[in-house]
Image (cartoon, rainbow, N blue to C red):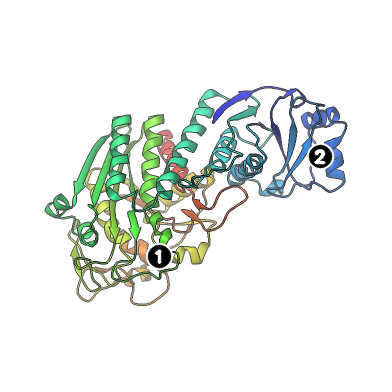
Amino acid sequence: MKVFAQDQKLEKMQADALAVFLFEGEKLAVDIERLDKALSGAISETIKLGDFKGKLYEVTPIYTHGKVPSIRIFLVGAGKKGEFDARLARNVAGAVVRRAVKIGVKNLAVYLRSGINAEEVIEGVGLASYDPALYKTKKEENGEIEELILIGEVKQQTIKHGQVITESTNWVRKLISEPANVMTPAAMVGEAKKLAKNYKFAIEIIDEEEAKKKRFGAFAGVARGSEEPSFLVVLKYRGGGKQTLGVVGKGITFDSGGISLKPSGKMHEMKMDMAGAAAAFGVMKVVGELRPKTNVIMTAPLTENLPSGRALKPGDILRSLAGKTIEVINTDAEGRVVLADALTYVQKLGATHVVDLATLTGAVQVALGSEAAAILGNKENWVRQVTEAGKFAGERLWQLPIYAEHKELLKSEVADVANIPPIKGAGVIAGAVFLEEFIEKKNAWAHLDIASTAWLESEKPYMAKGPTGFGVRTLVGLIESLEKGT
């Protein structure tokens, strides 16, 4: 999609569709009044008749019949002005696109009125344009938006930034959309190699045999159940800054639950259990394009979780890279087990600030639905900084506590830590408590449980059902805040 800015009067703008955002009950601004006059009052008449109320995600077309160069005007509901934020700005822009492509719009102009940020529009339009139907032999005839015209003064740097983030996020969504017989651990390593080659990252690939030799016992324990070769991959970027961020992504390319087998319903969606690793890859792709001054080290354990004669069994004991022993109570809590070694390793490599992204628990979906991911961590300032990056990026993060009493949940009679508690409850917190066992006290760490947000169960007005690429924009914003020293 080509994106460019044009400082043009609305009534002079030429496009297949011109989108104008309006809040509920607001008076038309001068620029829109001038457009309305050119249309013989069609906008004000539409509002007066109640055909457009400005409600969130409302999109009402007005055909211009040649009175202005644009073929149609989209009146776009932005909801209540006091509730409007970066997340909604992206979503509203997405709602326009979802409507526009259905009627064959190829070039879309968006009026950057007060309160509407160019980058938010670019991201909203780009994310809404993603087509998850990778393997359909017959595609929709309406196609996609070819040109996005931003009406207003916009720096080229802003346009590039928005495009890079959008393209990288949609690339992540493609990785997640791929079936598990295509996006295997080896295939993901192939993607990591491309990133290393294209952006001159240092890369380290640890296979199962090397993992055993180097005592990645937690990772190797989960990996042994699959016939597919498994790997732990590392990408390193040197930006020259003082701080080093560790980004760790859970990369279970298919999760059957192992011996503790999942129910069959929706198991086909468990190809998305590598969404954390995919998001981490996406972060590195943005880093490679934008070259920030922050140092970034990414680690991703890549394996399947399958039952077999060699697979991990309930009751098994694993010795992790950190030296701590893990009692495996349930093999379907494997993500935290592989992350234990990945978190340990990223700190050994020099990361002082760490964020992990993982589709870790079903409990987060119960707690937060699909509207937010959970965030937990060991240092309040760091959790707050990551949360603020998410807010700016339009990705909601909701903090859950880790109380001293929660640390009693994973006591084991035979090992240093159990991988799940003996009783139900506090599932999201228990996952974080386990991971914190592998964080050095001197380091800042935040855990993002993205199982609630990585995959949309149903279509939204602004986004298709399926993978979302959640986490990429938050982590990019975090990296940029570290670069600024905030």
Mark 2 and mark 1 residues within 8 Å of each other at the beta carbon: no
Q: CA distance from mark 2 to mark 1?
A: 47 Å
Identify the residue at horizontal 82%, vertical 28% (top origin). Answer: 34
Q: Nearer the viewer, residue 152 or 469?
A: 469
Residue 438 visible (yes or no): no
Q: Position of residue 340 (x, y in %)?
A: 27, 57
Q: Nearer the viewer, residue 81 or 316?
A: 316
Type of amino acid under label 2: Lys
Element type where label 2 sits in the image: loop
For the C terminus, which image quadrant? top left
Q: Quadrant of residue 36?
A: top right
Q: Position of residue 367 (x, y in %)?
A: 50, 65
Q: Is residue 138 left or right of residue 40?
A: left
Q: Quadrant of residue 39?
A: top right
Identify the residue at horizontal 58%, vertical 43% (top origin). Answer: 140
For the N terminus, which image quadrant? top right
Q: Is residue 413 left or right of residue 3?
A: left
Q: Residue 429: which numbered mark, if any?
A: 1
Type of amino acid under label 1: Ile
